Image (cartoon, rainbow, N blue to C red):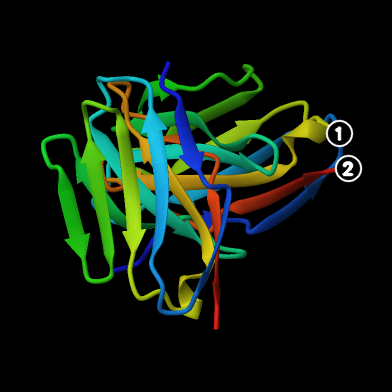
């Protein structure tokens, strides 16, 4: 079945710097790749997603890139702010239509 | 619009008991999925329902079951609770198996 690996497990950046989180997936049939942000005591919140027919998608300070050939996708956050501090999860959706999550990245933005 | 509502938010149960968790999806969403989140295993897929039919099931024992009603509300049940079932149980809804919105979860503690 699908397996998603996520790196790094923790990431500390200075406020205003950029943060990049990378994920790789194993099932070439996966066609949907969402990113979620989870704050303490809350459920995961969808922040951006991309489908396999698109190579890049941007929403204000957040962007996602997808390389289908290499089977990896990345989350880019520019001009980080303290409120960006949270746990971020990538996921892939194989043909079974379930979300397979990465292990998560703890992002700390230091002010 | 109202988000995904999960009740109760917290539960404490004794080993051997059974528990039922409830999820009300976003109005109009026909797909409801359940996930278990633990520090050790991360986010793991339990099952997905679409129009009252279980469309997909994860690798959990038969003690974990669910159902979906005609109004798309869903319940999951865990019988013969074990200490290892302690987790955050998350429900997510979607109109079409993409763009899942998660609820805040039910924190289950088994003692």
Is residue B8 depicted above or below A103 in this figure?
below
Does A63 sit left or right of A92 as displayed?
left
Q: Is residue B84 visible from the viewing direction of this image?
A: yes
Q: Position of residue A35 (x, y in %)?
A: 36, 50
Residue at 48% x, 33% y is A5
Name the chain letter of the residue that bears numbered label 2: B
State the residue in front, B9 or B85: B85
Residue at 71% x, 27% y is B79
- Secondary structure of the residue carrying tag 2 is loop
Residue at 41% x, 21% y is A2
Quadrant in the picture for the N terminus of chain B: bottom left
Disc 2 to disc 1, how far (Cα)? 6 Å
Residue A31's mark? none
Q: Where does label 2 land, which residue?
A: B111
Residue at 41% x, 73% y is A17
Looking at this view, name the residue that lies furthest to the bottom: A111
Is residue A3 depicted above or below A18 in this figure?
above
Mark 2 vs 1: CB contact within 8 A: yes
Q: Position of residue A53 (x, y in %)?
A: 11, 36
State the residue in front, B62 or A19: A19
Is residue A28 depicted above or below A9 in this figure?
above
Could you tell which of marks 2 and 1 lies nearer the N-terminus? 1
- Secondary structure of the residue carrying tag 1 is loop
Q: Position of residue A46 (x, y in %)?
A: 36, 56
Q: Where does label 1 land, which residue?
A: B15
Does B26 sit left or right of B63 as displayed?
left
Image quadrant of residue B2? bottom left
């Amino acid at each position: 079945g699908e397996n998603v690996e996520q790196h790094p497990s923790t990431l500390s950046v200075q406020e205003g710097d950029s943060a990049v989180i990378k994920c790789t997936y194993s099932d070439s049939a996966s066609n949907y790749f969402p990113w979620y942000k989870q704050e303490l005591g809350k459920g995961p919140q969808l922040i951006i997603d991309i489908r396999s027919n698109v190579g890049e998608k941007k929403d204000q300070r957040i962007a996602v890139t997808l390389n289908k050939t290499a089977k990896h996708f990345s989350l880019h956050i520019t001009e980080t702010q303290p409120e960006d501090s949270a746990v971020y999860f990538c996921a892939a959706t194989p043909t079974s239509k379930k979300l397979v999550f990465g292990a998560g990245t703890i992002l700390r933005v230091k002010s | 619009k109202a988000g995904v509502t999960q009740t109760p938010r917290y539960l404490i149960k004794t080993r051997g008991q059974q528990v039922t968790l409830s999820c009300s999806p976003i109005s109009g969403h026909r797909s409801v999925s359940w996930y278990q989140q633990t520090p050790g295993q991360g986010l793991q897929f339990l099952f997905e329902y679409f129009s009252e039919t279980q469309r997909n099931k994860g690798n959990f024992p038969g003690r974990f079951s669910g159902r979906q009603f005609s109004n798309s509300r869903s319940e999951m049940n865990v019988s013969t609770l074990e200490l290892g079932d302690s987790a955050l149980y998350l429900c997510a809804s979607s109109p079409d198996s993409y763009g899942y919105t998660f609820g805040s979860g039910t924190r289950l503690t088994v003692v």
